[in-house]
Amino acid sequence: MEALYNLVLFCVLFSILATCTVQDTITVDQVIRDGDTLVSASEIYELGFFSPGRSTNRFMGIWYKNISPQTVVWVANRETPITDLSGVFRVATNGSLLVIAGSNKTTVWSSETPTTINPVAQLLDSGNLVVRRNGEESFIWQSFDYPGDTFLPGMKLGKDLVSGLDRRWRPWKSLDDPSPGEFEGLMDTNGFPQVFIHHGSVPLTRSGPWNGNTFSGNPSHSPSSPINLKFVFDDKEVYFMFTIANNSLLSRAYMNPEGYFLHMIWVDRSHQWFTYWQQYINICTRFGLCGPNGWCNPDNSPSCSCMEGFEPRQPADWSASDWSSGCQRRTPLECPKGDGFRVFKNIKLPDTRRSWYNRSMTLDECMSTCKSNCSCIAYANIEITRGGTGCLLWFDDLVDVRTVEEGQDLYVRMSQSDITINESTSKPSYNKKRGIIIAAVSISSCLVTIILILVIVYAWNKKKTPDERIKIVDEEYNKQSQHDDDMELSYFSLVEISMSTKDFSNDKKLGQGGFGPVYMGVLDDGREIAVKKLSKTSRQGVNEFRNELKFIAKLQHRNLVKLLGYCNEGDESMLIYEYMPNKSLDLFIFDKIRSLTLDWSNRFHIINGIIRGLLYLHHDSRFKIVHRDLKASNILLDVDMNPKISDFGLARMFRDQENEANTNRVVGTLGYIAPEYAIDGTYSEKSDVFSFGVLVLEIVSGKTNRGFSCQMDDDNLLAHAWRLYEEGKALELLGAYMRDSCVDSQVLRSIHIGLLCVQHHAKDRPTMLSVALMFDQDCALPAPKQPAFFSEGTIPNVNQISISEVTMTTLEPR
Ligand SMILES: *[C@@H]1O[C@H](CO)[C@@H](O)[C@H](O)[C@H]1NC(C)=O
Ligand SMILES: *[C@@H]1O[C@H](CO)[C@@H](O)[C@H](O)[C@H]1NC(C)=O
Ligand SMILES: *[C@@H]1O[C@H](CO)[C@@H](O)[C@H](O)[C@H]1NC(C)=O
Ligand SMILES: *[C@@H]1O[C@H](CO)[C@@H](O)[C@H](O)[C@H]1NC(C)=O
Ligand SMILES: *[C@@H]1O[C@H](CO)[C@@H](O)[C@H](O)[C@H]1NC(C)=O
Ligand SMILES: *[C@@H]1O[C@H](CO)[C@@H](O)[C@H](O)[C@H]1NC(C)=O
């Protein structure tokens, strides 16, 4: 009886254990049936049977356990689908992994593992399915050696030169069919190794040789990127792989059935794959488009021309946009005498499949080696790191030469006459006038080409044509760093920012700043941030962005908004600030409901904070800074309702002796612009004082002064305040709801000072220093004159105020 009881207990316990523990390993005694799964130890990957897309066929594969929709990273029986639910996965006693299906138990897939005894199969947290001898560490077989459409961190693309194993990238035929399609990514080890993408057996595109940082012709890879690239080339193996700095980040390089390549990162917060690198395709991506010695530049029209010193081999074909015949030398070489080398800059190095290389030579040694052999036609350093190392020599035509933004120097042998005549230019010399006609002819064929061949640059970065934006932050940052050693600006990665803002989702958008949208985000450490993104379409934005960075990075004050860091990756530029939970002042004072929450003491506190901030800008910081766009929506409020001045996009710095400046372009916001600025375009710190005065009157009254230059009735805020002041009823300016909480003397003083600040003539306005003293002390105040509310024929010609696009955008609350 007791034995039976024990048996029952054992069975119960066993079944609990069996169902509760995650199983990541199977032995020869176990099977995984369709419906069962293996799960890696940390529950990242899951192995089992699935149906891709709209297909009902079953395949054994590996996917992310916690990602929906199901994202498959590896498939076993790619070419042998199972048509029913009879599939079984198991380990044979000889170590082979088997997928068996059907009533007659046909083997539909076998891993062909080298024979071993006592094998176990395990699904690792890296996504690798491995076979090993029980108790041993080393793998006898691993799924990472048989890639499909996905490369996971740690997978190698390339060859094991000892065993001959060639790991290629084989995308699916379609989203419904995981069998290998027409595209293939592979490491070509002829000459100096390069990665090629083939369509069938035709090379579609080429990575360029590895230059120590990335593949030649690609934008350099940032060391701060969460993704690390690795290229290994030694006696035993040649491969490329990526790894991830933080293993908690899920990342995959995926090639879709059209041969289009994406590198993606899973963003937990938004539950979607974020494309970290997208393949950038242009006509020059196509391998050898311009033929031998042709030169491709996507910015030119047509994109193909001959390298300097060369001319089309078949001019008729060229003018018909058939560039395949390429170019030939204009002047034959006269080696060994009379030749020299001409340097071409910013080049993606030509095809290296037939080149000779020595990885330790210097450039000088490389040159003399090439010079001494008349069949050598070009040379270049292999690596750009450490000042340039290694030597590549070409003996054939130069194929697939492109101009790129961050390219390498290529030295091409040329007859002395070709070098000296056109020494200054290194532009291609193909006839430009004819080019226009060719462009028209070629555009249609271009389009077809581009659509037909969605080719892949092995571009592990998506930077495009030169764009000044890309460099702004770095430039400014470097400049700053030189001057301000104490300044600490953090760099944020694009991934980090994307994650924190849910991939810049609309519900995270706080508003529109002068140079682009502003998003709210939460960093991993819980810090809340505001992200100002430079809009890709705004030219003006670039200047404002630059300006903002220039000023705000220098300034530190508790009444100025704090810049935490910046992000500058690909063609995205962003500034990251502390997040202001109460957003901006205008949302309080001009809102009927919310203004009730802001009693007099709050308002007085805010006015004082703004004074401190302006005092710092005008007098206390090392530079005199005029903000030029002071207004309620640029006063941000922290959780304790402390005001912080923001948005330095229009700010200007004054040197020591300078007090006034002039501008052709009046910028700023209607309702806040000082008259001398609106009329003459002259501005000084007193222009800010004017805006401050308007702001004070707005805070006190809860009314906006906007549109004062359009409305000619005296009902605008300044006129209204002036009339009440003159009639001795200034307290009536105060919103009724504040009467209970107010301190009359403070209110009157605020209105009085506000009116002094909005005087028509700049010289009649106090400086911020005086303003601060006036608020702090009970001294007698000078009597204000009639302020500048433009009611007596002083309205400036509105056409003369070039209210720029900036002004119009700043009319929107930021
Ligand atoms: C291992 O065994 C399976 C089935 O028992 C067989 O199909 C496979 O060919 C064997 N593999 C080797 C390498 O012998
Ligand atoms: C297994 O059975 C299926 C039908 O169930 C049949 O079509 C197939 O030919 C059989 N295979 C072998 C090897 O007997
Ligand atoms: C990796 O990322 C996770 C969450 O994103 C974070 O908690 C962890 O601290 C990071 N680890 C390192 C070493 O940065
Ligand atoms: C490469 O060049 C270096 C320096 O000239 C030389 O010492 C070395 O033997 C060369 N290696 C090969 C494989 O030619
Ligand atoms: C020049 O280089 C080629 C290719 O490496 C080689 O076959 C040939 O022998 C060399 N000629 C001389 C004169 O060194
Ligand atoms: C030099 O360049 C000019 C145009 O830049 C071209 O017309 C001329 O033919 C070139 N001469 C040679 C020898 O390449």
Image (spheres, rainbow, N blue to C red):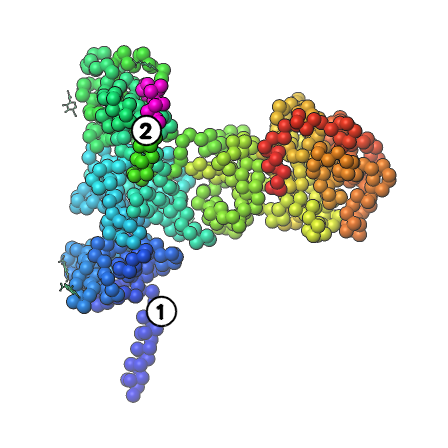
Question: Residue 498, image x and y in percent?
Answer: 46, 46
Task: Indicate the amino acid at tag 2.
Answer: Ser
Dot 2 crowding, Cα within 10 Å, few <14, some 14–19, many 20+: many
739 up-or-down from 407: above or below: below
Q: Which residue is mark 2?
A: 442
Name the outermost residue toward the bottom. Answer: 1
What is the CA distance from the residue labelled 1 to the residue labelled 2? 65 Å
478 up-or-down from 61: above or below: above
Task: Indicate the amino acid at tag 1.
Answer: Cys
Some atom of ligand 6 lies within 8 Å of the CB belonging to the residue at label 2 = no
Asked whether 446 or 352 is in front, the reply is: 446
| Quadrant placement of the C terminus | top right
Which residue lies at the image location 44% right of the left edge and 45% below the top edge?
A: 495
The secondary structure making up most of the magenta span is helix
Asked whether 800 or 510 is in front, the reply is: 800
From the viewer's perspective, tell me whether residue 147 is left or right of residue 647.
left
Which residue lies at the image location 32% right of the left edge and 29% below the top edge?
A: 442
Disc 2 secondary structure class:
helix
Among the 4 quarters of the image, the one containing residue 380? top left
Q: Which mark is residue 20?
A: 1
Disc 1 secondary structure class:
helix
Q: Which residues are magenta?
A: 427-440
